[in-house]
Amino acid sequence: MTAATINYQDLTEKIKSWGQELGFAEVGFSDIDLSTHEKALSKWLEKDYHGDMDYMKKHGLMRARANELVPDTIRVISARMDYLPNDAKFAQTLKDKNKAYISRYALGRDYHKLMRKRLKQLGEKIEQYCQKFNYRPFVDSAPILERPLAEKAGLGWVGKHTLLINKDAGSWFFLGELLVDIPLPIATKSENQCGSCVSCIKICPTQAIVEPYVVDARRCISYLTIELRGSIPEEFRSLIGNRVYGCDDCQLICPWNKFAQLTEQDDFQPRQQLDKTELLELFAWDEDTFLNKTEGSPIRRIGFECWQRNIAVGLGNADYQSNIIIALEDKLSDSSTMVAEHITWAISQQQLKQQTQQTEIPFIEVNERLSGRLIRAIEKGLPRDA
C-alpha cells in the first residue's frame, strides 16, 4: 500500500493483533514529545542520582528527544511482555537467609534478545503492509525514556517507584519500543492511579526512593548488585540481605500487582534452579561454572567478580554457620582485592553472629523491621500460582 491509501487507524488494530501473535501482552502508540520530562531528567542527572552509570549523563536530554536518536521518528510503538514465572517462590526465598534471591526478571533467558527479535518481526510485518516504512527496535539498548513513552502509549502509568504499572497487569513486565516514521494515531495517556499510597517508598530496604517518582540509583539494591562495578558501600551491605542480583521489594509490596499476569513465555521460567539455590552453592562456583550456568542469562553481564562480591555480601547476612566462615576463608587468598574486601566483611558479620549466639543475645538484622511486612504482602497480594 502507498502512504496515501493507508488507513492508519486500521493499521494500529493490525499492529495490536500482530503484537499478540508475537507474544506481547499489549501494544500502544505515542508521539515523541517528552519535553515535560526534560527538567526532571536534568535535575536527576545534576544530583548524580545515576551513580557510575556514565552513559546516562553522556546522552543527556537526547533521552527525551527520540528524533535525535533516530531522525525522522514521529511515533513510538511501545510493547510490553509479562515475565512473572509460575511459582516464583518470593516468600520462601526471602525468608530463607541462606538462599540467594535473584530478581525474578533474571531467572530465565535474557529478555533483551528475545524481545528485540519479536519487535523486529513486528516491524517487518508493518513494513510488508506499508512498503515505505522505516523503524528501529530498542530494548534497554538506547538512550530513551521508555516508561514515559509507554505511559503516553496507554500501557500504564509511572509509579512512585518509577516503574510502569498497568491496572490490569501490575508491573511484572518488560518494555520495548519501535521508533517509526509513520503517522499512527496516538493513544490516550494512562491516568496515574497511585493515589496516596507510599508502600514502595516505605518498604525499600535502602530508602532509594528519595521522593515520589525519584530514585537515587546509588542507594538502589538493583544498582548496587548489577550496575556498580566497584565496592558496595558498607552502609548498604547489611540492608541487601540475601538479594544477590537485583531487588523486587517495591514491586512485591505494590497493591496493583495482585492483578499481575503470569508469563506465557517458557523462556522466562527459572533456569539452573536459580530460584531456590543456596548461597554456599553459588559461592562454590568457579568462573567457568559461572559462565556455563549463566549462558543466555542477563546475570552473565555483571561478570564473575561482581557475582562473587554479591554472594559474599549475602553470606555475611546469612544465618550463622561455621561452614560459611570456612568457605569464605578458603576463597579469601585467591580473590581480587574488591572481592576480598567483601569476604572480609562477611567473615566479620558471621563472627559477630557467632558471638551473639554464644551469649544468647538475639541478633536482629538491620532490615528485619521490614521483612515481616513484605512477606505478608507477598503472600496476600500475588496472583494464583505465582
Image (spheres, rainbow, N blue to C red):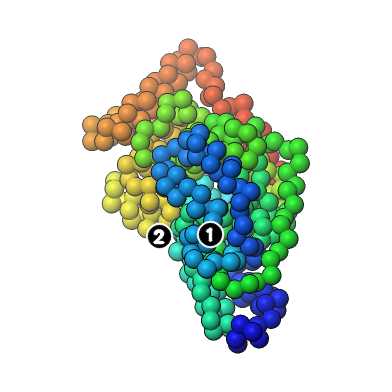
Q: Does the image show residue 266?
A: no
Q: Residue furthest left?
A: 333
User: Residue type at mark 2?
Assistant: Gly
The residue depicted at 66 percent of the width and 55 percent of the height is 151
Give the x, y percent position of residue 300. Answer: 38, 52
User: Residue type at mark 1?
Assistant: Ala
Q: Does the image show residue 182?
A: yes
Question: Can you say whether 94 is above or below 190 in the image?
Answer: above
Give the x, y percent position of residue 302. Answer: 38, 47
Quadrant assignment, res 76: bottom right
Q: Where does label 1 land, which residue?
A: 66
Q: Residue 108's mark? A: none
Q: Please, what secondary structure does the residue beneath circle 1 have?
A: helix
Q: Please, what secondary structure does the residue beneath circle 2 have?
A: loop
In this rendered view, identify the residue nearer to me: 91 or 19: 19
- In the picture, which quadrant includes the N terminus? bottom right
Q: Are marks 2 and 1 in contact (CB under 8 Å)?
A: no
Among the two numbered marks 2 and 1 on one chain, the one whose residue lies closer to the N terminus:
1
Give the x, y percent position of residue 257. Answer: 68, 49
User: What count of labels does the image hold?
Assistant: 2
Give the x, y percent position of residue 304. Answer: 32, 45
Q: Residue 296's mark? A: 2
The residue depicted at 51 percent of the width and 74 percent of the height is 134
Mark whose residue sits in front, 2 or 1: 1
